[in-house]
Amino acid sequence: MTLDRRRFLTACSRAGITSALLPGVLYTLAAQAQETATGHQDAPKITDQMIDQASLLAGVGPFSDEQKKMMLNGLNDERSSYEPIRALKLANSVAPAFVFHPLPAASSGADCGQPTVRPVTRVHASGAAAPANIEDLAFATIAEIGGLLKAQKVTSLALTQMYLERLKRYDAKLHFVITLTEERALAQARKADEQIAAGKYRGPLHGIPWGAKDLLAVKGYPTTWGAGGFEHQSFDEDATVVKRLDEAGAVLLAKFTLGALAMGDKWFGGRTRNPWNPKQGSSGSSAGSASAVAAGCVGFAIGSETLGSISSPATRCGATGLRPTFGFVPRTGAMALSWTMDKLGPISRSAQDCALVLEAIYGPDGKDASVHPASFAWNPAFDWKRLRVGYLKSEFDAPEPLKADEPKGNETEEEKNKRERRNDERKQRRARSDYDRRFELAGLDRLRALGVDLIPIELPKLPYGAMTALLTAEAAAAFDDLTLSGRDKLLTEQGVQDWPNSFRIARFYPAVEYIQANRARSLAIEQVSALFEKVDIIVAPSAGTQLVATNLTGHPALIVPNGLRGADAPRVPVVDEGDEVGGPGTPVSLTFLAGHYQDARLAAFGWAYQQAAGFLNLHPRLD
């Protein structure tokens, strides 16, 4: 029977159905019933009982018997509105026919003109002598190493060999490598040395070894997305970011781990570890990128963030991460998770390093339609003191006193034990939060000591958490075939919070509610953007409301190390549950935010803070 979607939707409309979810639920229920009865799917027949079940899931109705009777003929004309599209077998690289941009409607696009010639920051030849042991440069910044390379006091080949050896040595402990690109790296390093010796210096990344999160395609090597079932996947073209770093003369050493399909730090080969405490995970999903940078195993790495995937592992591992403005860096050749939230950015050892990397990778590529032609004018000598700096006052304030759950009447022993465990877990989380707040407040004090007049501001009161269902809906579409084919069973993690279950749940998210959440997101973009008319920079804790809000609004964030927890740090939970895990001797961070496409200004302010704060030379003891 041929499809007649118009008749189907007309029948729904006449019955008063306003949820775009209901037809899909009806089809699924009918298909399941038909398969049970016949052993195969064939022309599923919708019944009034199925309408009742579907209306509950869709949050519409209930419908009267008369309404359901009116609906049945029209609904049963619809046999499969999904099958023709499913038959197309859409690849992950095919984007929807809409493009998200994070600029508010009133924006004039100021400061967003693309320069005719991409500027390249030049590093000065280093006057310092080369170290007797090349491994002494393992934790050096890009600027430090670049100066030595330009002056030909060290070679890219020697650096590459040193970092490759460290990657092999520490991977057994930290599990951050999926694939070494050793042959490619050695060839690139030799080429870089030849070019520098011939006076063909390309800029600050020339000869610098780096690593890529393994959601970036690299021709000739697997691109696994960290997920079971994708271990041997490969692509015939390099991602745009990889191409641009090749053009800048950087040397790709490895493809680093990510939690399966960009969630967490667990991948098909195990769990990536925190160099400061290998008993803990590195957090994710840019797990290997942050861990390897913090362990001194590459000069820098590329990570990605959709909802915390640069911020969280940078915090956990004590690295510096720059999550660029949405639409600043092209994602061509990168795994798609959420077309309206995915962002690629650098993870390195300083804000200056992040700026040097972003300078090489930003700007339109003619393929990723979301990329805006904005400029990036990195100037390490920028006068940051003229910036207006705000801070999210309520997120630095002490929270309300903790209230324990009280026993209820006729409480069983099992219920009592659960209540007591719940209260104890809350007390532990609060103790860790209270301890870490000392570092956050110390960060504000440092800024005041630098002469910064901090202006208290607050995020608009909006339901940011409710909008994150947009991400899951887009992710379920990006990996539609996994759910339909049953290949989601190959993914390592199968818990309630993991992708397989989330993808299934997302299929019941109404299209109408998706649009409504996007309308709420428009309010968030306008109202959060309005804060940057009052201030240029916002200081915030790295976790909390701002992380969700600014990922939705597309504003840039710089995450910088802000100290190490002392021996008096509260105990950590037995189960590593993510960002809240701390413990003695592990890093904490602070986050700076800026207006759309003000990433260079953001990096300059963060670089000034890092130089004053004194945490640039902290690194873990690995042996």
Image (cartoon, rainbow, N blue to C red):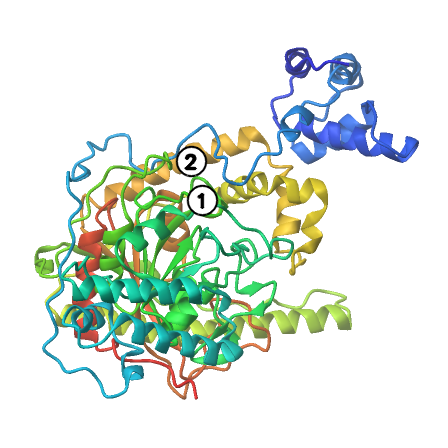
Q: Mark number for residue 281?
A: none
Q: Residue at x 61, y 26 (%)?
A: 19
Residue at 62% from the left image edge and 55% from the top image edge? 498
Q: Is residue 359 left or right of residue 570?
A: left
Residue 562 visible within the image? no
- Name the residue located 34 percent from the left edge and 36 percent from the top edge: 101
Instruction: Estimate the spatial distance between the alpha carbons at disc 1 and disc 2, rounded to whole Å.
Output: 8 Å
Is residue 258 found left or right of 101 in the rendered image? Answer: right
Q: Residue 517: image x %, image y %?
A: 47, 36
Percent position of residue 112, x then y? 19, 38
Q: Residues within 10 Å of mark 1 (few under 14, many from 20)?
A: some
Front one among 328 and 69:
328
Please determine whether, in this image, residue 177 is positioned above or below residue 55.
below
Q: Position of residue 266 (x, y in %)?
A: 57, 65
Split into 4 quadrants, where in the image is the C terminus? bottom left
Residue placed under numbered mark 1 in the picture: 463
**Image vertical order of residue 587 relative to residue 304, above or below:** below
| Residue 91 vertical placement versus 196 (above, below) | above
Q: Quadrant of residue 38?
A: top right
Amino acid carrying label 2: it is Ala
Element carrying mark 1: loop
Residue receiving disc 2: 520
Q: Are marks 1 and 2 in contact (CB under 8 Å)?
A: yes
